[in-house]
Amino acid sequence: MVAVEDFRRNKLREGRRPDTGDDVEQNGGLEEMEQTIDAVVSKLHFSSTEEVMVVRRRPHVVNGGGFVVTDCREKTIFKIDGCGVLGTRGELVLRDGDGADLLLIHKKGGMVQALSIHNKWRGYSYDYQGSPKPVFTLRDPKQSCFSITGSIRILVQPGNCYFDVRGSFPDRDCSIVDSTGSVIAQVKEWSGSKDIYSVVTKVNVDKAFVFGVIAVLDYIYGESTSC
């Protein structure tokens, strides 16, 4: 079982270097916020050019599900594990190609959440000291209240920046757009298979954030990270 404290200890052991994109200075300037908000998780995973990444879902019966993300050279960039691997419902972990933890994502619970019309997911990264840092909250309408095709919004901390998911993830035809309506990533069909699809990331986009969102979408729609 993965817990926040376990994840924190992993980051301490890794001795991660400080990331210049991890902290947003609270100087009240909108321009400064816009310049740094793209580093939701880390500038180490920014796309310097438009990139096409390939997602391959892993079968539950072989290794507990989840999926692997590769680049155009078939190098593994990210690995995503869900409850089939972690043994905990509503919990996801995104790792880099070397297996280092980047994001811990979990679904909120409790009475307040039970009464809400939305499901809420929280994504946590960790600084170089191993301290937990909330980086985004994703909310989606509950099926019992609205159609699952309703608006899915991601709020980024700190600041008031947000992103929306538009289109249909199960049909491999959706986009993640920022608050200005600009597309930062697109999910597209690949060879007619639901088990393999592509994700196009635009220039200067935090790919770790993009695939953290996609990991939650995968779980919401009952795919490889769910159980």
Image: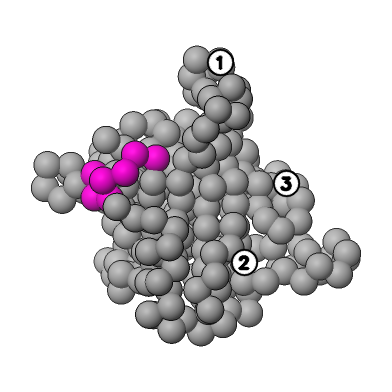
Q: Which mark is residue 179?
A: 3
**Percent x, y for residue 114?**
53, 25
Q: Amino acid at mark 1?
A: Cys
Q: Eyeballing the image, is 138 above or below 15?
A: above
**What residue is at 76 percent from the left and 56 percent from the top?**
159
210 is within the stretch colored magenta: no
Disc marking residue 145:
1
Q: Considering the numbered disc 1 on the image, is that residue within a helix, a strand or a loop?
A: loop
Label 2 vs label 3, nearer the camera: 2
Could you tell me if the residues under marks 1 and 3 are in contact, i.e. CB atoms within 8 Å? no
Toward the viewer: 111 or 70?
111
Q: Residue at x 66, y 53 (%)?
A: 156
Which of the two marks, 2 or 1, is nearer to us in this view? 1
In percent of width and height, residue 95 lies at: 36, 64
What residue does disc 2 label?
39
Q: Residues within 10 Å of mark 2 (few under 14, many from 20)?
A: many
